[in-house]
Amino acid sequence: MADKCHLCLLGLIFLSSLLTGTSGEDDVHVFISSGENVRLPCNNTLPDCKSTTWIYNNRHSAVELIGLGIKKKDTERHERLSLGSDCSLNIKNITKEDYGSYSCRQYVNGQQQGDDTRVYLHVLHVSSSSSQTEISPGSSVTLSCQLDSSYTGVSCHDSGHSEGIEVFWVNQAGVKLTISDSRYQISASGHCISNLTTTLLNEDDNREWRCEVTHRNQVKTSVTYTVKKPVSVIVNVVGASFAVLLPALILCLILKKRAGVRRATDDSVEQTDDVIYTEVTVSKKKRAKKNKVHCDHEMTYASIRGAEAGDQENCSPLYASVNKNHHKSGK
């Protein structure tokens, strides 16, 4: 029985949504770009949010997102929805499927209190006729900027209407692009859609094209599209540069290695060629004097060594030893 009552209540909500006027002074319009977070205000709240119900309306049905302050778990938007402390509806990471009409209502003891707050969510997004991997200088690309909206009270490109919504492209200086610009072709292919077609140049890498939407002659939101060179092109350029530099790098390493080997050889010669032996023997005989012992003096100078290490110019001190042999007189 409770389920049947809930279905009946939901049907009445949908029917009343359809019967409510298509436009009103209290209607709220929110413009947002895809991928951003949005807050939908509720202007008829009671002291707390336990009476607040949020309903999403499209052409085919009405979906209850928040029921008496509690988030519904059986909706596709469940993970992206939250109820603010002021009973506003917060939606994360907006997609183009989120556009449409949202109604905020208050129920007390099963009875609706006051009128709805109707919020129209308009989502602006840009798509390209080519994937980023196909974009390169000299190629033609068409960017399509579209505003998804279910609101029928205003029309796009109706500059004579005070509530007219206009979608258009601007250059980097913020100046509106028109059909008089020779490089760009601007066209409209449907309701609230503006197309920009151009041939890319080398300097267009990382260039941003911006699409804006105005409502009542005020800019509401904008979305940019950045053109980047394909990764494959960058890889090819880097590969070609590496192919040119690789031989030079190898030659540099070979020369460096040879220089290191030469230094090591020189060091080896200096360390091993360090022993030079020279032995000098001098014999000297003196005549014996009267009443004195005859003696022969023999001196041996041995082992004059060079430096053990270091440069050949920096020699170590010379060492010498003197050996004297004493011979007794008469022997």
Image (spheres, rainbow, N blue to C red):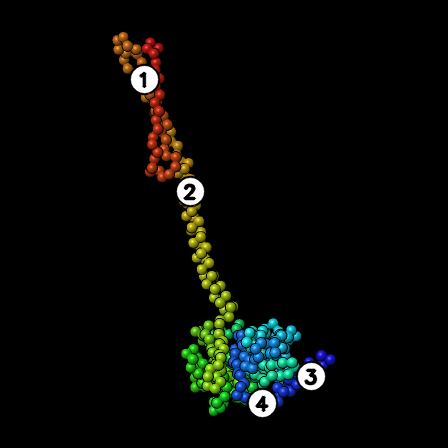
Taking the spot 42% from the left edge, 43% from the top edge, the residue there is: 264
Please tell me which residue lies in front, 264 or 108.
108
Q: CA distance from mark 3 to mark 2?
A: 99 Å
Residue at disc 2, secondary structure: helix
Q: In the rendered image of this protein, does residue 294 appear above or below residue 56?
A: above
Q: Earlier in the sequence, mark 3 or mark 2?
A: 3
- In the orientation shown, which residue stands out farthest toward the right? 1
Q: Which mark is residue 21?
A: 4
Please tell me which residue lies in front, 291 or 74.
74
Percent across and percent down for residue 50 are 61, 76
- Asked which quadrant contains residue 298, the reply is top left
**Image quadrant for the C terminus?**
top left
How would you rate the neighbour count of disc 1 (Cα within 10 Å): few for under 14, some for 14-19, many for 20 or more? some
Contact flag, marks 3 and 1 (Cβ < 8 Å): no
Taking the spot 45% from the left edge, 74% from the top edge, the residue there is: 207
Q: Which mark is residue 8?
A: 3
The residue where tag 2 is placed is: 265
Residue 248 visible within the image: yes
How would you rate the neighbour count of disc 3 (Cα within 10 Å): few for under 14, some for 14-19, many for 20 or more? few
Q: In the rendered image of this protein, does residue 85 appear above or below residue 302?
A: below
Please tell me which residue lies in front, 162 or 112.
112
